[in-house]
Image: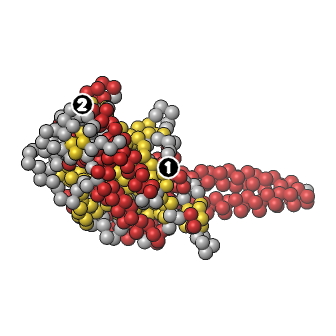
């Protein structure tokens, strides 16, 4: 959410920054509503003052026995009371209109974010590892003979519909091992605090992180009005919702492994084969709450944490800065990490790390008290995948595949698999 004072002070600059995201100018509409709201508030205050003056004079008129003046003043008090109530209601209506507009506007990109229309305009900033050259035609994950016994889309479709998968046996174990490895790395190496949180949240929490009101169709809502989280960014970030914390409490760095749910309403027809794009999936999420001066550096740190997981698993990847046309709603700058998938012969997103500035904090009213005793200020928030577990499973299977259909598993996973190193052609860990 945006600071209305910033828009008042520099409306043209605000419009120019929104224009980088392909949006038309809105400052004039915002300021007109804001002006009407402030006028109603001022008028209500003036009417209240008149009501108070008349209330004081009523008693004096009564004491003097001036019945006509007494009745006039008493009527005036009633009129002003009604006027105050009406003006306050009108101000609230204008405030609601203003809030709806501000809630629906995306964050403003940093100056160093590249301009562009879509993913073709993203800019690569880092690359690690060399894609393996196969002496055979590599297969996609769901085509591997060693994988098909433990990756069942047909039964999942019977249970739940399309874009679900039933993992079993060795594949389920590798999937679980990946999540455990990610958590342990983030906790023991990267200093994040492990967190277990609900996957059902109330509507205010979805507004707080920006999933609502604009993207409700991409999430699942229960009949009781609760929402299934699209990622534990929602729960972890909202830990500070409505809270004012001490500056010494910053930074806070959280990680959580959770089920995630997305209806993918805006992705119909994309990546329908395999488990690349699912309605239910698992992620190990990272969230940071920082001092405003440190949030940009925290983005680089978070990106390195995610990259480190891929490097430990020996998976080639590249990191790109998303252009203005490809950025998420709440981000000021986003680093996407794309892992190499030999079955597709391309890099695919496996992590997205974003700095949101005070955008989410304003929606959540999350502040900190400066150590020097100054006025409380909004914290900055960041979020990132560390990593998407299912997509990491795909990458491990595809990059480790052998010509006989078996899969050589990364050394980092061996301790999590009881020392097993290979998925044999029949799907057994050995």
The residue drawn where x is 42% and y is 65% is: 298
Q: Is any atom of residue 394 visible in this view?
A: no
Circle 1 packing at 10 Å, graded few (<14), some (14-19), many (20+), is some
Q: Are marks 1 and 2 in contact (CB under 8 Å)?
A: no
Indicate whether 372 appears above or below 37: below
User: Which residue occupies the foreground of this view, 401 or 251?
Assistant: 401
The residue drawn where x is 12% and y is 53% is: 133
On the picture, is 375 further left or further right than 210?
A: right
Give residue 212's position: percent from left, percent from top: 43, 47
In the picture as drawn, the residue positioned furthest to the top comes out as: 158
* Residue on which the image places disc 1: 195
* Residue on which the image places disc 2: 149
Q: Is any atom of residue 191 visible in this view?
A: yes
Give residue 191's position: percent from left, percent from top: 46, 60
User: Which residue occupies the foreground of this view, 77 or 381?
Assistant: 381
Kindly state the secondary structure of the residue where label 2 is placed. helix
């Amino acid at each position: 959410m945006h600071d209305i004072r910033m828009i008042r002070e520099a409306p043209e600059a605000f419009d120019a920054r929104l224009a980088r995201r392909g949006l038309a100018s809105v400052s004039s509409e915002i300021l007109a509503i804001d002006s009407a709201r402030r006028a109603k508030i001022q008028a209500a205050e003036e009417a209240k003052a008149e009501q108070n003056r008349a209330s004081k004079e009523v008693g004096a008129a009564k004491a003097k026995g001036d019945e006509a003046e007494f009745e006039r003043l008493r009527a005036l008090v009633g009129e002003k009371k009604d006027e105050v109530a009406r003006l306050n209601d009108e101000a609230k209506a204008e405030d609601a209109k203003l809030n709806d507009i501000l809630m629906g506007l995306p964050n403003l990109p940093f100056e160093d974010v590249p301009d562009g229309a879509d993913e073709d305009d993203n800019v690569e900033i880092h690359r690690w590892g060399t894609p393996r050259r196969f002496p055979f035609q590599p297969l996609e994950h769901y085509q591997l003979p060693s994988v098909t016994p433990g990756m069942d889309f047909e039964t999942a479709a019977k249970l739940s519909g399309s874009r679900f998968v039933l993992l079993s046996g060795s594949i389920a174990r590798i999937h679980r091992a990946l999540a455990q490895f990610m958590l342990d790395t983030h906790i023991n190496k990267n200093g994040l605090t492990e967190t277990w949180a609900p996957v059902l949240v109330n509507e205010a929490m979805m507004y707080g992180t920006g999933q609502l009101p604009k993207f409700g169709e991409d999430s699942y809502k229960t009949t009781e009005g609760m929402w299934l989280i699209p990622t534990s960014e929602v729960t972890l970030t909202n830990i500070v919702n409505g809270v004012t914390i001490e500056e010494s409490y910053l930074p806070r760095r959280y990680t959580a492994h959770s089920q995630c749910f997305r209806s993918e309403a805006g992705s119909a027809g994309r990546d329908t084969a395999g488990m690349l794009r699912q309605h239910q999936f698992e992620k190990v999420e990272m969230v940071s709450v920082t001092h405003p001066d440190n949030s940009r550096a925290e983005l680089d740190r978070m990106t390195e944490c995610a990259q480190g997981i891929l490097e430990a698993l020996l998976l080639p990847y590249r990191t790109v800065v998303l252009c203005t046309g490809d950025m998420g709603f709440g981000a000021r700058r986003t680093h996407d990490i794309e892992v190499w998938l030999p079955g597709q012969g391309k890099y695919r997103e496996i992590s997205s790390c974003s700095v949101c500035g005070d955008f989410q904090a304003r929606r959540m009213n999350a502040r900190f008290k400066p150590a020097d005793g100054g006025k409380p200020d909004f914290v900055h928030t960041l979020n990132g995948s560390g990593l998407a577990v299912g997509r990491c499973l795909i990458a491990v299977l595809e990059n480790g595949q052998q010509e006989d259909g078996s899969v050589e598993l990364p050394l980092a996973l061996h301790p999590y698999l009881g020392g097993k190193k290979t998925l044999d052609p029949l799907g057994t860990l050995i």
